[in-house]
Amino acid sequence: MTNPWILSLWVGVGGFAGSIARYGLTLASQRFAVGWPLGTLLANFLSCLIIGMLAGLIDRGAMVSPVVRLAIATGFCGGFSTLAALVYETADMMRASEYLHAAIYVIGTFLLTMTAFLIGALAIRMCMKLAGG
């Protein structure tokens, strides 16, 4: 099954499940850690655990179909946590002894996403100020 439309559908199914699981975990964790992102921490940890297990299976020669890999790694873990994708891709670079690329990827990702966050926050603040709020 290599039809890109069918594979995309499986990514979407996994992404939907991961997103719903992330939301549910966030709601459930708010009972235990008010004001602290326990749900995010748990989602990132669990997603990395799942994707690490999948990578471990593949490294050990387990036959994991492209559909299952895409549905779990790209779909579910992508919807559950974007950190898992970063860790998975960095681990691939490190397995290939591309340590400099791995470091640039991790640091660059952090800097770019932090910059995007700050730009977004600043844009909202400026819009609110212009609107008189």
Image (cartoon, helix red, strand yellow):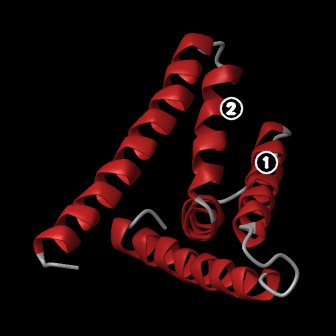
Asked where in the image residue 68 lies, by quadrant, the reply is bottom right
Residue receiving disc 1: 52
> At 71% from the left edge and 80% from the top edge, which residue is drawn?
26
User: Please, which residue is most extreme toward the left here?
Assistant: 130
User: First in sequence: mark 2 or mark 1?
Assistant: 1
Amino acid type at circle 1 is Gly
**Against 76, is 109 above or below?**
above
Amino acid type at circle 2 is Ala
Rendering coords of residue 103 (x, y %): 58, 20
Number of numbered discs: 2
Q: Secondary structure at mark 2?
A: helix
Q: Quadrant of the C terminus?
A: bottom left
Asked where in the image residue 76 lies, by quadrant, the reply is bottom right
Asked where in the image residue 125 lies, by quadrant, the reply is bottom left
Relative side of 21 to 111, left or right: right
Task: Count neighbours of disc 1 (C-alpha within 10 A) and say few if under 14, some if 14 to 19, many if 20 or more.
Answer: some
Relative side of 120 to 132, left or right: right
50 vs 30, nearest the viewer: 30
In contact (CB < 8 Å): disc 2 and disc 1? yes
Relative side of 64 to 105, left or right: right
Rendering coords of residue 101 (x, y %): 52, 18
Residue receiving disc 2: 91
**Against 132, is 105 above or below?**
above
Rendering coords of residue 30 (x, y %): 77, 83
> At 73% from the left edge and 53% from the top edge, which residue is drawn?
51
Rendering coords of residue 120 (x, y %): 31, 58
**Which numbered dot is residue 121?**
none
Q: Secondary structure at mark 1?
A: helix
